[in-house]
Image (tube, helix red, strand yellow):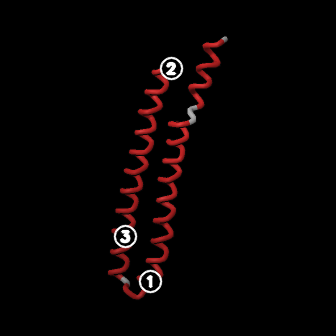
Amino acid sequence: METIISFTAISVAILIGLGALGVGIGMGLLGGKFLESAARQPELAPMLQVKMFIVVGLLDAVAMIGVGIALFFTFANPFVEQFANLTAN
């Protein structure tokens, strides 16, 4: 039982960490490309900015979904119940 809980804690940490790393890299690339395109064509900057904020919102949503799944595994771990059912039989 302790092994399942410890592996769950490790997997939750990896899930949140890799999600944050991916979002950070994605936002960095997105911001850099936005600055390049706004410097190249300044008249398109307002339209590009709106699209950039939409994509940033989608990137944040991916990270929040990862946090939600991690919290599910932390507080309502289905593997502990399955392990309890296996050992009870």
Q: Amino acid at mark 2?
A: Met
As drawn, is 78 to the left or to the right of 11? right
Extreme residue toward the right, this view: 89
Residue 42 found in image quarter: bottom left
According to the image, label 1 marks what residue? 46
Q: Amino acid at mark 1?
A: Pro
Extreme residue toward the front, this view: 75
Q: Earlier in the sequence, mark 3 or mark 2?
A: 2
Q: Earlier in the sequence, mark 1 or mark 3?
A: 3
Foreground label between 2 and 1: 2
Depth check: 23 or 42 in front? 23
Asked if residue 13 is positioned above or below residue 23 in the image, the reply reads: above
According to the image, label 2 marks what residue? 1
Residue 80 found in image quarter: top right
The Cα–Cα distance between marks 3 and 2, rounded to whole angstroms, is 48 Å
Q: What residue is rendered at 44% in x and 33% in y?
A: 9
Dot 2 crowding, Cα within 10 Å, few <14, some 14–19, many 20+? few
Residue 15 in percent (x, y) is at 45, 42
Residue 39 in percent (x, y) is at 32, 81
The Cα–Cα distance between marks 1 and 3, rounded to whole angstroms, is 14 Å
Q: Amino acid at mark 3?
A: Lys
Asked if residue 28 is positioned above or below residue 7 in the image, the reply reads: below
Q: Which mark is residue 33?
A: 3
Q: What residue is rendered at 49% in x and 24% in y?
A: 4
Q: Earlier in the sequence, mark 2 or mark 1?
A: 2
Secondary structure beneath label 3: helix
Image label count: 3
Secondary structure beneath label 1: helix
Asked if residue 82 is positioned above or below residue 62 in the image, the reply reads: above
